[in-house]
Image: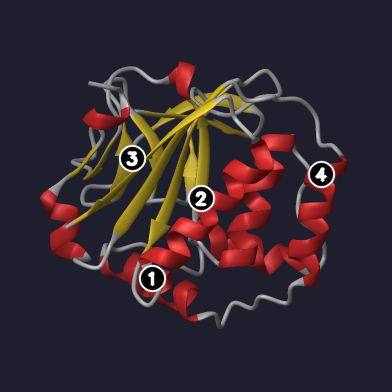
């Protein structure tokens, strides 16, 4: 059994949003490194696409955040935050992160990428009890934070890897220019279809050309 086979979603999450689906892709043999011509072209395409915050999939995610107690004006779904930045310029970080950020904007799909070597045990999506640890940075200094009770979080055996479903990733599993093994998470709600969700994953793999990849769709 592979690491991806052990990934899971708590029934409490599906009770909140029965329409939720997660497309998970483990990609190995990636070529990391700084932003390059290919990732720059994809970012420019996303910036010029004209996707707006009125996109129905982004509206669905804002409503979802309200359902579990997050204020989407302060704690924005990741794709919503990126779409708002597209008109004035998306961040340039590294070639892998730039690629999935651009696709997140183009498809209006919350997307995360994390270094697989930073994980401790299986990936799972659950509702927090508030005692879980989350390593992050505040005012330039590393700190340990905690999710709120009831918050939807991705986690592993060591702690929370992403707070508020897809809002903020931890430091421990952050991608770097040295990353060669990654897990990519694509979050979907209605009205996004499974075919549209798969199209994002396919384009990511086409752009990054990993040596090998495993894909799994988890749904209720």
Q: Quadrant of the N terminus?
A: top left
Which element carries disc 3, helix, strand or loop?
A: strand
In this view, the mark in front (2 or 3): 2
Q: Mark 2 or mark 1: name the one nearer the start of the chain.
A: 1
Answer with the quarter of the image where residue 177 lies.
top right
Per the image, the residue denoted by label 4 is 38
Q: Quadrant of the C terminus?
A: bottom left
Q: Mark 3 or mark 4: name the one nearer the start of the chain.
A: 4
Give me the C-alpha separation between circle 3 and circle 4: 30 Å
- Whole-percent x, y for residue 2 in the image: 29, 22
The residue shown at (82%, 65%) is 88
Which element carries disc 2, helix, strand or loop?
A: helix
The residue shown at (33%, 69%) is 64
Per the image, the residue denoted by label 3 is 154
Q: Mark 2 or mark 4: name the one nearer the start of the chain.
A: 4
Question: Does the image show residue 26?
Answer: yes
Give me the C-alpha separation between circle 4 and circle 1: 28 Å
> Residue 193 has which mark?
1
In this view, the mark in front (1 or 3): 1
């Amino acid at each position: 059994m592979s690491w991806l086979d052990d990934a899971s979603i708590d029934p409490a999450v599906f009770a909140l949003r029965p329409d939720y689906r997660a497309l998970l892709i483990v990609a190995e043999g990636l070529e990391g490194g700084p932003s390059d011509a290919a990732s720059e072209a994809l970012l420019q395409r996303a910036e010029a696409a004209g996707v707006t915050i009125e996109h129905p999939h982004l509206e669905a995610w804002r409503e979802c955040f309200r359902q579990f107690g997050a204020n989407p004006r302060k704690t924005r779904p990741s794709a919503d935050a990126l779409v708002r930045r597209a008109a004035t310029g998306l961040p340039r970080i590294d070639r892998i992160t730039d690629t999935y950020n651009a696709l997140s904007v183009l498809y209006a799909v919350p997307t995360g990428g994390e270094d697989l070597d930073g994980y401790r045990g299986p990936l799972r999506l659950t509702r927090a009890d508030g005692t879980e640890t989350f390593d992050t940075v505040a005012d330039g200094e590393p700190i340990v934070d905690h999710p709120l009770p009831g918050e939807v979080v991705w986690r592993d055996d060591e702690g929370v890897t992403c707070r508020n479903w897809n809002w903020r990733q931890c430091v421990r599993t952050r991608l770097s220019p040295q990353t060669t093994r990654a897990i990519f998470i694509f979050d979907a709600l209605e009205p996004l279809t499974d075919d549209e969700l798969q199209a994002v994953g396919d384009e990511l793999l086409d752009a990054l050309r990993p040596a090998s990849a495993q894909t799994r769709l988890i749904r209720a």
